[in-house]
Image (spheres, rainbow, N blue to C red):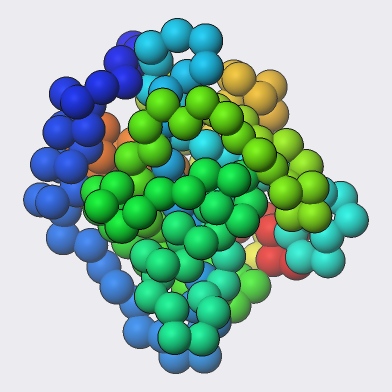
Amino acid sequence: MEFKFGDALRSQISQNLEQFDRIALDTGDLRLAAVAIVVVKSDVNDEACFLLTLRPVRMNRHSNQYALPGGRLDEGETTQQAALRELHEEVGVELGSDQVIGVLDDYATRSGFRITPIVVWGGDCETLAPDPGEVEAAFRIPLSDINADHVPRLIPSDEGEHPVLCAHIETLGHTVYAPTAAIFYQFREVALRGNPTRVAHFDQPAFAWK
């Protein structure tokens, strides 16, 4: 099933997110971070996509991993401000707070972060300008890729009692793992399907802790 980019889809996503009772985690010792799930138009047709990045091999943390645009909060920032700033810095997409259409559950990572996923309507977004210092490549992933029957896949965790969530993305030809996969899976369930699905309990593979 393809999702056509346009006002009807924005309204559907907005309504589903408005009805969702998100869970905010206590900060505790966790460092604060935010990511942006940015819904954009495909650059080849009218299909709706979201933005995904690949981090450079040379990065100290989470190198060569697929990730949503985002990062840690600067002092005094809100999660929304951080997500929009990182989106601009990483892929050159500048959007205002009026394009934020919802928030998903916080997700605590093994590497010590509390990630808040901010859902943003990105419009046509004709040009991406990845920062080579932070992004190896940027991709438009059709929403139909994460709506496929084989998404998600659960595999045993080497360390925890809960399974690791992952998803094979046809456009990439690669598998993406939690926390990124867990976040865009919850986006699918909540924003696209209207289901109150929780994902914070799913584990991450050991390589994602670093």
Q: Is residue 146 above or below residue 183?
A: above
Q: Quadrant of the C terminus?
A: bottom right
Closer-to-camera residue (90/191): 90
Residue 84 in sight from this viewpoint: yes
In terms of image quadrants, where is residue 52? top right
Where is residue 125 drawn, in percent x and y?
47, 31
Q: Nearer the viewer, residue 22 or 100?
A: 100
Q: How many marks?
A: 0
**Residue 109 drawn at (x, y percent):** 55, 68
Picture layout, residue 126 above or below residue 32: above
- Residue 154 lies left or right of residue 129; in this view the side is left
Does residue 68 appear to the left or right of 115 in the view shown?
A: right
Displayed quadrant of residue 199: bottom left
Answer whether residue 164 is visible to the viewer in this image: no
Residue that appears at 35% across and 84% down: 26
The N terminus sits in image quarter: top left
- Give how far across and how far down residue 35 sits, in percent: 48, 57
Q: Is residue 23 above or below residue 131?
A: below
The residue drawn where x is 52% and y is 10% is 44
**Viewed as shown, does residue 2 lie left or right of 13?**
right
Quick one: 8 or 180, which is closer to the camera?
8
